[in-house]
Image (cartoon, grey):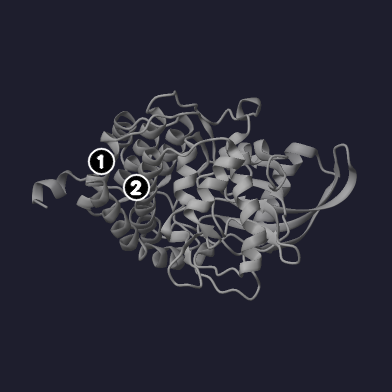
């Protein structure tokens, strides 16, 4: 890099209003995505993450509830929840007069942003998606949302506490559930639910739901273009190095954008580790982590779910199992039968490359930025996750070579 280029580089830790405006002009994304990314940059020069106490969070929750339901409630049993690499989570019990139910004690969860997250997302979008999925697939009940951080230190939502586990109590796994080994019997029971729930999400008539935080893509390539602009913009905002392979991938993705067949609700992180199930009967009790969800192309979910990053080998040491459950061909066949949708092979492959592209950007670009700036409570974990970026890049390189 020449001295001139170094002098012309924007100061990404102190972004100017002019640079933020330039990024907004250069990349076209959904309006709510533009707002949250712009807000992230506007706040970046501010203080890093400062540890928040349970007392502070309880006070914030109390202020939020006063504005929503008045003063007749009691918050108790506040405690931290572990798990997840991007959000702060506190469990608590609320004694209150629940509409149409009466006085009850409800186990709840507060889900809140840190100062800056490895993946910047909207609590309102997540709130609306979970609410839209009630009665379609198992999800927590969402109660309230503090989208702008008016009452709490950062944007947050409050939902019910869902029972269950993300993996068998005697199973080993890596971060976020990757590498979890399931027994054949557990796979036999979980796999049909896993497949049918994804089909139900994609088949649901989202037009009847309140999804005002989402823009709806047209039937052309707008969906793919919005997604690609989203992650290209994030790379520009967060990265501190040039990786030519990412530019090659972006150019290939831009030239080969698939047309949207039918817009559906896309979970965007549908995999083992993001649902809870009860161990005694292996029944899925809740689907979690809807923060990256969008109205888009079902192939994005199918490509993410079938990623090798979340797969395991069967006992024969050869057969690759989708999320450790069943071979990809069986999974896609079962999905087609359950949903009534067909799988377009070209769209699926495009989204497999797109997903690796976005994941590499999160790990190598955003992960670096938030950890080095001390913006998250999970700086050690995120620094570890950054090391996976080279593996994702290599997977993407192989995919691009196969396409070439």
Measure the C-alpha gap from mark 2 to mark 1: 9 Å
Left or right: 59, with 104 as reference point: left
Q: Earlier in the sequence, mark 2 or mark 1?
A: 1
Q: Is residue 223 above or below residue 193?
A: above
Determine the residue positioned at 69% across, 59% down: 277
Badge 1 marks a residue whose secondary structure is helix
Q: Nearer the viewer, residue 292 or 371?
A: 292
Please count the marks in the image. 2
Q: Nearer the viewer, residue 116 or 192?
A: 192
Q: Quadrant of residue 387?
A: bottom left
Q: Nearer the viewer, residue 213 or 342?
A: 342
Determine the residue positioned at 31% across, 53% down: 396
Residue 209 in view here:
yes
Q: Is residue 126 above or below residue 105?
A: above
Left or right: 141, with 332 as reference point: right
Furthest residue to the right? Answer: 102
Residue that numbered label 2 is attached to: 353
Q: Position of residue 91 (x, y in %)?
A: 70, 58
The local crowd at label 2, few if under 14, some if 14 to 19, many if 20 or more residues have their Cα within 10 Å, is: many
Q: Is residue 82 above or below residue 288?
A: below
Q: Position of residue 297 (x, y in %)?
A: 47, 35
- Which circle marks residue 252 in the picture? 1
Q: Position of residue 201 (x, y in %)?
A: 61, 40
Left or right: 201, with 242 as reference point: right
Residue 242 in view here:
no
Instruction: Tell me if label 2 and label 1 are in contact, CB under 8 Å.
Output: yes
Badge 2 marks a residue whose secondary structure is helix
Determine the residue positioned at 42% across, 40% down: 37
Q: Quadrant of residue 398?
A: bottom left
The local crowd at label 1, few if under 14, some if 14 to 19, many if 20 or more residues have their Cα within 10 Å, is: some
Left or right: 189, with 397 as reference point: right
């Amino acid at each position: 890099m020449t001295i001139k280029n170094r002098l012309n580089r924007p100061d990404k830790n102190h972004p100017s209003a002019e640079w933020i405006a330039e990024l907004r002009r250069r990349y076209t994304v959904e309006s709510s995505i533009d707002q949250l990314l712009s807000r992230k940059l506007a706040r970046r020069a501010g203080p890093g993450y400062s540890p928040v106490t349970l007392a502070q969070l309880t006070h914030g929750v109390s202020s939020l509830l006063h504005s929503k339901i008045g003063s007749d409630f009691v918050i108790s049993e506040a405690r931290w929840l572990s798990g997840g690499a991007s959000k702060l989570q506190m469990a608590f019990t609320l004694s209150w007069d629940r509409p149409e139910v009466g006085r009850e004690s409800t186990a709840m969860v507060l889900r809140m942003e840190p100062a800056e997250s490895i993946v910047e997302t909207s609590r309102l979008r997540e709130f609306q998606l979970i609410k839209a999925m009630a009665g379609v697939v198992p999800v927590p009940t969402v109660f309230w949302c503090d989208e702008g951080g008016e009452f709490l230190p950062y944007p947050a939502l409050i939902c019910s506490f869902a029972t269950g586990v993300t993996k068998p109590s005697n199973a080993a796994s890596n971060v976020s559930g990757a590498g979890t080994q399931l027994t054949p019997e557990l796979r036999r029971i979980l796999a049909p639910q896993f497949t049918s729930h994804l089909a139900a999400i994609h088949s649901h008539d989202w037009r009847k739901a309140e999804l005002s935080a989402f823009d709806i893509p047209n039937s052309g390539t707008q969906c793919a273009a919005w997604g690609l602009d989203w992650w290209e913009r994030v790379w520009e905002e967060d990265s501190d190095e040039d990786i030519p392979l990412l530019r090659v991938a972006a150019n290939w993705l831009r030239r080969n954008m698939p047309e949207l067949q039918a817009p559906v609700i896309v979970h965007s992180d549908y995999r083992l580790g993001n649902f809870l199930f009860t161990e005694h009967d292996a029944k899925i009790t809740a689907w979690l982590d809807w923060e990256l969800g969008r109205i888009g192309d079902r192939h994005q979910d199918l490509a993410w779910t079938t990623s090798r990053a979340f797969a395991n080998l069967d006992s024969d040491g050869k057969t690759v199992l989708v999320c450790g459950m069943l071979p990809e061909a069986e999974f896609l066949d079962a999905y087609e039968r359950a949903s009534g949708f067909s799988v377009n092979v070209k769209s699926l492959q495009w989204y497999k490359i797109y997903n690796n592209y976005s994941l590499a950007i999160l790990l190598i670009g955003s992960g670096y930025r938030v950890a080095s700036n001390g913006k998250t409570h999970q700086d050690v974990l995120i620094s570890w996750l950054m090391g996976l970026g080279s593996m994702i890049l290599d997977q993407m390189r192989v995919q691009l070579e196969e396409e070439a």
